[in-house]
Amino acid sequence: MTRIRVLVVDDSVVVRRLVTDVLATSPEIEVVGTASNGRLAQSKVEQLGPDLVTMDVEMPDMDGIAAVKALRASGHRMPIIMFSTLTERGATATLEALSSGATDYVTKPANVGSVQESMRQVADNLIPKIIALTAQRPAVRGPLTVRPAPARPPVGALRPGTRPGTRPGAHPAGPAGAFARPGA
């Protein structure tokens, strides 16, 4: 079984470390890299080809929403989980991120009494979503590639089963009396 390759994007070094440590507890997941903003996330996606990205919403230089839009515009189709606090402002931003192409969201723990409790909440909410969203992942990583359409014959070329002088799709003429008027 191949492990799920995850890129963790958050401007907080503490949150990046917490998420990385939590994901390391799952034998199905491997954190392949981290980034502190959306601009760095774009280059890390190109460089590392992760199966999934966790993305903070509010970050300096390029926020999570702009990063999602840029990744989708460049053809990347891996799942992106927004990882934010759902304050009123955060909820609006998360909805905007989802409408911009993010796949899902997980709420960051807030007002939790201990680091262990924060880690438990992240593990309970994030790991199952990562596994579920990558269950049907394609074997090929990187941007979505568009295959060229099959070549079409030039206009006016004969299709198999047609004769010169007939229109494509027209039925060959039958016996001479086939189009005779009734009663003639």
Image: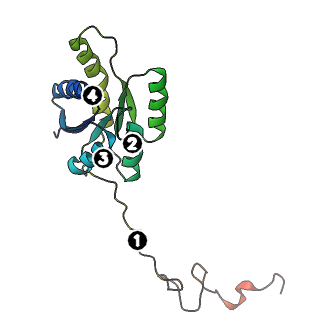
Please give left or right for residue 83 compared with residue 93 in the image. left
Q: Which numbered disc, 4 or 2, marks the residue closer to the eye?
A: 4
- In space, the residues marked 3 and 1 are separated at their CA atoms by 33 Å
Image height check: is 6 above or below 146?
Answer: above
- The total number of labels drawn is 4
Numbered mark located on residue 68 in the image:
2
Badges 4 and 2: C-beta atoms under 8 Å apart?
no
Please give left or right for residue 54 compared with residue 156 in the image. left
Image height check: is 68 above or below 10?
Answer: below
Q: Quadrant of residue 30?
A: top left
Classed neighbour count for the residue bearing mark 3: other residues with Cα under 10 Å, few (<14), some (14–19), many (≥20): some
Label whose residue precedes the other's in the sequence (4 or 3): 4
Label whose residue precedes the other's in the sequence (2 or 1): 2
- Pick the residue in front: 155 or 35: 35
Residue matched to label 1: 150
Residue matched to label 3: 42
Q: Can you give x and y, in whole percent of width and height, for residue 113 in the image? A: 27, 7
Residue matched to label 4: 12
